[in-house]
Amino acid sequence: MSEKSKKPDQVVYNEDSEKYDAGLLPYATNSGAPKITATDLTGWKNANVSKVNHQIETEFEALKSKYEELMLQYEYNHLIYSAEFSFEPIVGKIYHLYEKSSGAIFLSIISPNECNFDFKGSFKLNEDKMWIRIDN
């Protein structure tokens, strides 16, 4: 660099583009420029992490509850479909599940107050052929 083209330190000159480009730089170029400080995001992060964790935990609990409901529904349906019965159940009708003294499970139209078998529950067959417990 020749003495003629040497610029003072406070002048920002880009020799590649041969332009003064101090206004285009992403950082301060002179001592009178405002101080650049990084924003402290710790409080923002902590507050939002707490909110997000709460939301995820709430959704997880809802899914867990739904899963437990489905598993109970599965167990009821498995129990009834593996039970003994000698009739074709009608959609919308209420049936009662009993256990014989031998341990066999059977489905009946007889209500619990009309017999003395070990009562397991009352169920209704819906249009999807799924058994819904109605005596909870």
Image: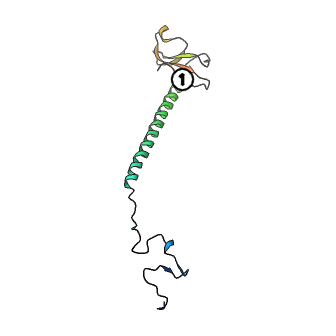
- Is residue 82 visible in the rendered structure shown here? no
Query: Is 63 on the left-hand or right-hand side of 40?
Result: right
Tell me residue 99's x, y (percent).
47, 17
Tell me residue 109's x, y (percent).
55, 13
Q: Residue at x 51, y 28 (%)?
A: 73
Q: Nearer the viewer, residue 1 or 21?
A: 21
Residue furthest out toward the bottom: 3
Tell me residue 24's x, y (percent).
51, 72
Q: Residue at x 48, y 18 (%)?
A: 135
Q: Residue at x 44, y 39 (%)?
A: 58
Residue furthest out toward the top: 114
Residue furthest out toward the front: 32
Q: Residue at x 44, y 46 (%)?
A: 52
- Label 1: how many Cα within 10 Å (few below 14, some 14–19, many 20+): some
* Amino acid type of the residue that numbered disc 1 sits on in the rendered structure: Ile
Q: Nearer the viewer, residue 53 or 98?
A: 53
**Eyeballing the image, is 86 above or below 7?**
above
Label 1 secondary element: strand
Provide the residue designation for mark 1: 132
Tell me residue 61's x, y (percent).
44, 37
Q: Nearer the viewer, residue 52 or 135?
A: 52
**Eyeballing the image, is 124 above or below 10?**
above
